[in-house]
Image: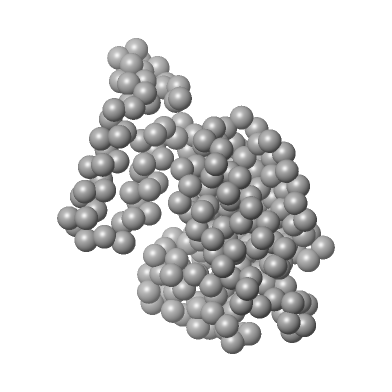
Amino acid sequence: MEAELDTVKVEKDGKIATVTLNRPERLNANSHEMARDLDAVSQLLDGDKEIRLVVIEGAGRAFSAGIDLKELPKDNIDIDMMPPWENGLRRFETMDALVISLIHGYAIGGGLQIALASDIRVCTPDAELGLTAIEESILPGLGTWRLPRYIGLGRAMKMNTLGNYIDGEEARRIGLVDHLVDEETRHEELDGIIEDYMAGNSLGGRNTKHATNAAFDHDYEAFMDLYMELQRESMSSEDFDEAMAALREDRDPEWA
């Protein structure tokens, strides 16, 4: 698979797909076109059951600098952009494939929203991250819902209402990002991180993603029901049989 839309490029290599935000001349700033393209790309990837892992990265000097501030005051960005934007992010969040964002340069506003909708965030130490919509007197999308889940209500309230930036080091310290990589070797280091996550990317691993994402959405009884459903599915799968065979034979499993 290879697709190139106006603002997003997609490449597939076996079980791994790479999504590249592709407006480098605007630091991959968000626009109506990018909202539409991300929505379309998320549908494409969600429908491809061969894909086990998705990487999202930005072309050029940044992951994404957020909403396009040249277009906003011209009324070229409006409320109609929000549904396809949020639908696309939610689809990345809920698809079976594990989604990893590789952050460098800037992950501001909508850029950080994309990263928050990913399962894992890999970041360079000097990258700048923030939800700055307060500067335009608008809400930072569903970053208002996702950010507290990662860093707690107090820290999220501070970031959302001040619109301040933090660097990758601080983001790692407070749990906003999961891995730090050097700017110059970020792709090589990402390859090792991908290898680690792919080693556990069985049906059980994918169901673990779904269960973990539901952790704050249910009371104990409802979550227990969900857990039992996902566990039964995992333990009756080919991947579970392969895991047991690999244990008996003292080898690494090969997932379906």
In this rendering, is residue 206 above or below 80? Answer: above
- Name the spot of residue 73 as percent of width and height, x first: 74, 84
Q: Is residue 174 above or below residue 95?
A: below
Q: Is residue 225 visible?
A: yes
Query: Residue 83, position in %: x, y?
Result: 56, 67
Q: x and y percent of residue 101 in the render?
A: 58, 52
Q: Quadrant of the N terminus?
A: top right
Quadrant in the rendering for residue 131: bottom right
Residue 82, compared with residue 210, is above or below; it is below
Q: Residue at x 42, y 21 (%)?
A: 252
Residue reaching furthest left?
A: 221
Name the outermost residue toward the right: 25
Residue in the picture at 39% in, 65% down: 149
Q: Residue furthest bottom?
A: 137
Looking at the image, the residue that sits furthest to the top is 249
Q: Position of residue 106 (x, y in %)?
A: 66, 65
Colour scheme used in the picture? one colour
Q: Quadrant of residue 35?
A: bottom right
Q: Residue at x 58, y 50 (%)?
A: 42
Observer-nearest residue: 214 or 60?
A: 214
Whether residue 124 is visible to the viewer of this picture, yes or no, is no
